[in-house]
Amino acid sequence: MFIKSLPHELNANPYQSKILFPAAYRELDFKTIDKLCRINPEFEQFIEQTDRLMTAHE
């Protein structure tokens, strides 16, 4: 079985690795988040935990 190797810039030392495709910043889509919460209770739990962590210092 032959697997074509994709170009990569990973290195055992993370400081020598390169980011090839940086993430794009996007605004939160609350309509989609609400829909995902209705579909998946675990996602809703994740969102609730994240909200508690993000607002813990307030």
Image (tube, rainbow, N blue to C red):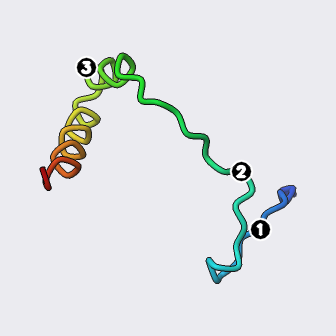
Inspect the image, locate mark 3, and give the three-letter code of the amino acid beneath it: Arg
Q: Which residue is mark 2?
A: 21
| 53 relative to 33 in the view: left or right | left
Characterize the local packing of mark 1: few (<14), some (14-19) or many (20 or more) Cα atoms within 10 angstroms: few
Depth order, front residue of 18/8: 18
Residue 8, quarter of the rendered image: bottom right
Inspect the image, locate mark 1, and give the three-letter code of the amino acid beneath it: Glu
Using the rendered image of the protein, determine whether residue 20 is visible from the camera's viewpoint. Answer: yes
Q: Is residue 55 above or below residue 43?
A: below
Q: Is residue 27 above or below residue 31?
A: below
Q: Is residue 6 above or below residue 25?
A: below
Q: Is residue 28 above or below residue 9?
A: above
Using the rendered image of the protein, determine whether residue 1 is visible from the camera's viewpoint. Answer: no
Q: Which residue is mark 3?
A: 38
Q: Which one is in front in this view, the residue at disc 1 or the one at disc 3?
A: 1
| Residue displayed at 14% across by 55% down | 57
Residue 38, quarter of the rendered image: top left
Q: Which residue is mark 1?
A: 9
| Residue displayed at 72% across by 67% down | 18
Distance from disc 1 to disc 3, alpha carbons, whole Å, reads 39 Å
Q: Which one is in front in this view, the residue at disc 2 or the one at disc 3?
A: 2
Q: Which element is circle 1 on?
A: loop
Residue 6, quarter of the rendered image: bottom right
